[in-house]
Amino acid sequence: MDTNDSLRVASLWHSMHAISQQLSPTTGCSEIELLEANTFDLHCFQSLTGSKFFVVCKLGTQHMEALLKVVYELYTDYVLKNPFYEMKMPIRCEVFDINLTQTVQKDRVALLGR
Amino acid sequence: MQFFGGSEISPSPPTPTTTTGNNAHMIYIFNRNGVCLLYREWNRPLHTLNPQQDHKLMFGLLFSLKSLASKMDPTSADKGNLGVPQLPGQGCSFHSFRTNTYKLSFMETPSGIKFILVTNPRTSDLRETLKYIYNLYVEYVAKNPLYTPGTPIRCGLFNTAVDQYVRSI
C-alpha cells in the first residue's frame, strides 16, 4: 500500500469514525476499537490528543490494546520528544523503528510461548 | 458457511452471551440497492438523525467499511481501488466492529441482502445469529407470494419472529 492509499484509508477512517458516533444507540460513544473481518482484525487506539494508532493482526489475537498502548509510549518517547521531528510529517526515526520492531517481536514470542 | 442447506429452519443457535436477554438495540435489513427493508429498534435512548438520514448513513458506512476491509486485507495479493463497489462474495469483508457503547454485526448474503444487528459491546460473535435471522427472512419474506422484492417488509409474522428471537439473545 503506497502513501496515497494510506492517506485515502486514513481519511476514510476519519469519516467512518464520525458516522459511527452518530449512529450510536446510546450517548458517550468514543471510537471504533475493533474491526473484525474475514481474514484479519484491525485494532484502533485513540490517544487523548486525537492521534490514532492502528494494528492489523491475525484473527483473534489477544492483548492488542496493550500493544497499542506500548506503541503510544514509544511514540511519545522517540518521536514527540525528538527536537528535530516536525509535527504531522511522516516519522523517520531509526530508534523508533528499532524499538517498534523489538516490541512486536517480543509480543510475538510471548504470544507463541503461551 | 451454508446458505442453502435444507429447507427447514435450523434449530436456533445457542445464545452467544453470558448475560442472556435484551442485549440488542436495533436491527437493519437493506437490499443491494440501499433500500431499507426493515428497521426495528428495541432499545435506543439516543436518536441523532431522522430515520431517512439514519438509514442512508448506515448503508454508506457499511459500504465504506467493506471497501476499507478489502483494501487493508494482508492476505490477498491484488486489491481493488478504494471506492470500487465490491460484489457480495468478492474480497475480504468485515463481519463486525465494536465501539465502547455498541457492537455492530454485519452479514451479507450472496443476493446482496445485508443484515445489521446493533447490540451491547459485550456480546460475542453473532454470525450464527444473523444466519438464523436470514433463515427467518427466507421463510417469512422471500417465500411470501404477496411480497414484492425491493419494498419495505410489512409482514407481522416476520416482525414477531424476529422480535421473539432477538429478545432471547
Image (tube, rainbow, N blue to C red):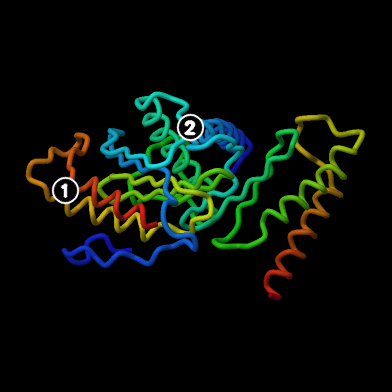
The answer to whether residue B165 is left or right of residue B49 is left
Query: In the image, is residue A36 above or below residue B36?
Result: below
Query: Residue A14's x, y, as percent?
Result: 58, 32
Q: Residue at x 55, y 43 (%)?
A: B101
Query: Which residue is the extreme one toward the left?
Result: B145
User: Crowdedness of circle 2 by 10 Å Cα count: few (<14), some, many (20+)?
Assistant: few
Q: Which residue bears the numbered disc 2?
A: B46
Question: Residue A46 has which mark?
Answer: none
CA gap, disc 2 and disc 1? 32 Å
Work out whether disc 2 and disc 1 sit on a shared chain: yes
The chain carrying label 1 is B
Question: For the residue labelled by badge 2, is the local secondary structure a helix, a strand or a loop?
Answer: loop
Question: For the residue labelled by badge 1, is the local secondary structure a helix, a strand or a loop?
Answer: helix
Q: Residue at x 47, y 41 (%)?
A: B65
For discs 2 and 1, the disc positioned in front in the rendered view: 2
Three-letter residue code for mark 1:
Ala
Looking at this view, is B46 or A3 the one in front? B46
Q: Which residue bears the numbered disc 1?
A: B142
